[in-house]
Image (tube, rainbow, N blue to C red):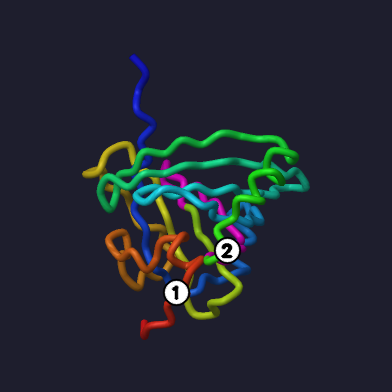
């Protein structure tokens, strides 16, 4: 019996990070993701991710089960497949561009997403093995609030409208 591919993730809104500190402690990737036309209740996207001069293309389909848990099916694809899938881009959604900083600390991988449209905030995401798992907060990152339950802060929602609420 095949295991269901769950993604268990918490997301936090953080103060814009100290870039010099990130450059010294984390590995950057440049990401562009485009959302595709998909049935209600799921998100379908393609992503190009450039890290250290190498670009990887992926196709991902997610179905939300709870705020923290999703079914996630992700496959690496060729550049040609990526370009073909881009033809199915949802015309109502903008492509998302960001720099993802991967910070390995305390035995965890923290992913810090810095977007070009914000100068005062960013995201920190952490994938967990179960919904109740605890983890230490990274010392050099200033928490604003958890946004795992706030649908305005999903990447798919950002592709429609960027929130600029007071922090």
Determine the CA span between mark 2 and mark 1.
Answer: 31 Å
Quadrant location, the C terminus: bottom left
Task: Name the residue at 63% across, 57% down.
Answer: 32
Magenta segment boundaries in residue numbering: 93-110
Whole-percent x, y for residue 113 in the image: 52, 61
Q: Is residue 95 magenta?
A: yes
Q: Residue furthest top?
A: 1
Of 71 and 141, the residue lying toward us? 71
- Count numbered badges in the picture: 2
Q: Residue furthest bottom?
A: 166
Q: Earlier in the sequence, mark 2 or mark 1?
A: 1
Q: Is residue 20 magenta?
A: no
Whole-percent x, y for residue 101 in the image: 57, 56
Task: Name the residue at 40% across, 70% down.
Answer: 142
Q: Which residue is mark 1?
A: 15
Disc number lying in front (2 or 1): 2
Task: Name the residue at 51% across, 36% down.
Answer: 74
Of 112 and 33, the residue lying toward us? 33
In the image: residue 121, left or right of residue 116: left
Of 35 and 120, the residue lying toward us? 35
Q: Which residue is mark 2?
A: 91
Whole-percent x, y for residue 17 in the image: 52, 70
In the image: residue 15, left or right of residue 71: right
Say above or below: 33 vs 72: below
Question: Which secondary structure lies at badge 1?
Answer: strand
Callout 2 environment at 10 Å: few (<14), some (14 to 19), or many (20+)? few
Magenta: predominant secondary structure element? strand
Of 139 and 8, the residue lying toward us? 8
Whole-percent x, y for residue 10 in the image: 34, 53
Task: Name the residue at 37% across, 68% down.
Answer: 152
Say above or below: 81 vs 4: below
Label at residue 163: none
């Amino acid at each position: 019996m095949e295991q269901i591919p769950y993604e268990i993730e918490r997301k936090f809104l953080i103060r814009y990070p100290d870039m010099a500190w990130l450059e010294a402690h984390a590995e950057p990737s440049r990401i562009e993701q485009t959302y595709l036309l998909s049935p209600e209740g799921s998100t379908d996207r393609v992503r190009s991710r450039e890290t250290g001069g190498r670009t990887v293309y992926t196709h991902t389909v997610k179905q939300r089960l709870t705020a923290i848990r999703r079914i996630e099916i992700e496959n690496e694809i060729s550049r040609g497949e990526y370009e073909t899938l881009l033809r199915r881009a949802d015309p109502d959604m903008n492509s998302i561009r960001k720099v993802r900083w991967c910070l390995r600390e305390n035995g965890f991988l923290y992913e810090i997403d810095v977007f070009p449209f914000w100068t005062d905030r960013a995201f920190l995401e952490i994938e967990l093995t179960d919904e109740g798992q605890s983890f230490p907060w990274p010392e050099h990152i200033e928490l604003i609030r958890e946004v795992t339950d706030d649908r305005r802060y999903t990447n798919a929602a950002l592709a429609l409208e960027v929130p600029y609420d007071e922090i």
